[in-house]
Image (cartoon, rainbow, N blue to C red):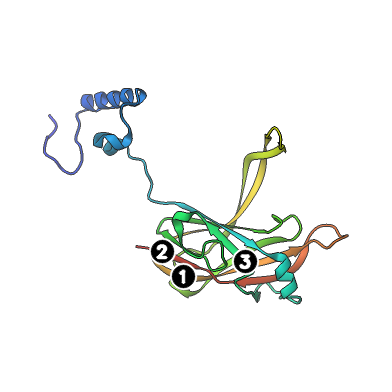
Amino acid sequence: MASTESSGSIDFPPWKFTIVIRLINQLNKEKKMTENDDPVFTTLFATETTSATIYVQIIIDTDALIAAYPKPSQDYKNPTGIGHNMGFMVTATEFVNSGQGTGDLSFKAEVGDTIRWTSSSISNNFDSAVFVYQMNKFSGTQVTDTPELKTFTKTSMVPQTAIPPTVTQAPQNYWFMTCEVLNIGTEGYNVCFGLYNRVRGGTGQTLYGYFYWDPTITVAV
């Protein structure tokens, strides 16, 4: 017979475990119980993870940047520093410390989280395009591993008509600078990006210059 002493977990004989599963499944089907209503259900079937994937969208005002910096660096190892009014960053509200929608976004993460940065011009990379190619620490504690470029191909909706709203599904590429959070602390980091410009009358997008600026990550205990 299984011991009935408490050891911090529930010790069920096999037959009782089966009965509990069947009972919980039946009650859930009848909508008489949820995960939060029953401690046995929570103990047996809790699946919530403590890690999160944090998406950070970087938007660059490329027209203002071109007007303000007529001769930017052409060396990706030595990009031109820019004012914080040229770029805007957003992430999910739950991760924001301060500066949502500005060039001084400070966001929080926890050890084990994944951070994915994606970048765009105001034209959604249609005219000028932005490509973040490097992110490196310049102050504070190193809280992540080195971000690296990753491309994901995923079937996604493509709009077809506005009225009535219709879409189709097609493979699309999504690229991110991705890293894992390894340590607690606060890190100031440089966002380095290339700006590719489409000249009127030309074809394709050519390099205009390399730039950088410096937001902040805070990782909680």
In-image side of 22 versus 125 (left or right): left
Q: Tell me where residue 189 appears, x and y as whole percent.
A: 52, 70
Q: Tell me where residue 209 appears, x and y as whole percent.
A: 72, 70
Q: Tell me where residue 153 appears, x and y as whole percent.
A: 63, 45
Task: Inspect the image, locate mark 3, and give the three-letter code of the amino acid beneath it.
Answer: Gly
Instruction: Work out how far the residue at label 3 is from the one at label 2, CA to CA, in angstroms.
Output: 23 Å
Instruction: Work out how far the residue at label 1 is from the one at label 2, CA to CA, in angstroms.
Output: 8 Å
Packing grade of label 3 (10 A; few <14, some 14-19, many >=20) is many
- Res. 74 visible in picture: no
> Where 198 falls versus 77 (above or below)?
above
Q: Earlier in the sequence, mark 1 or mark 2?
A: 1
Q: Locate the N terminus by quadrant.
A: top left
Mark 2 secondary-structure assignment: strand
Task: Inspect the image, locate mark 1, and give the three-letter code of the amino acid beneath it.
Answer: Glu
Pair 3/2: label in front: 3
Q: Earlier in the sequence, mark 3 or mark 2?
A: 3
Q: Which residue is mark 1?
A: 187
Mark 3 secondary-structure assignment: strand
- Among the 4 quarters of the image, the one containing residue 177: bottom right
- Among the 4 quarters of the image, the one containing residue 90: bottom right
In-image side of 106 versus 22 (left or right): right
Q: Locate the C terminus by quadrant.
A: bottom left
Packing grade of label 2 (10 A; few <14, some 14-19, many >=20) is many
Are the residues at dot 1 and dot 2 in contact (C-beta closer than 8 Å)?
yes
Q: In the image shown, does 221 or 13 lie closer to the viewer? A: 221
Q: Which residue is mark 3?
A: 87
Task: Inspect the image, locate mark 2, and give the three-letter code of the amino acid beneath it.
Answer: Val
Pair 3/1: label in front: 3
Q: Which residue is mark 2?
A: 219
- Among the 4 quarters of the image, the one containing residue 111: bottom left
- Res. 158 visible in picture: yes
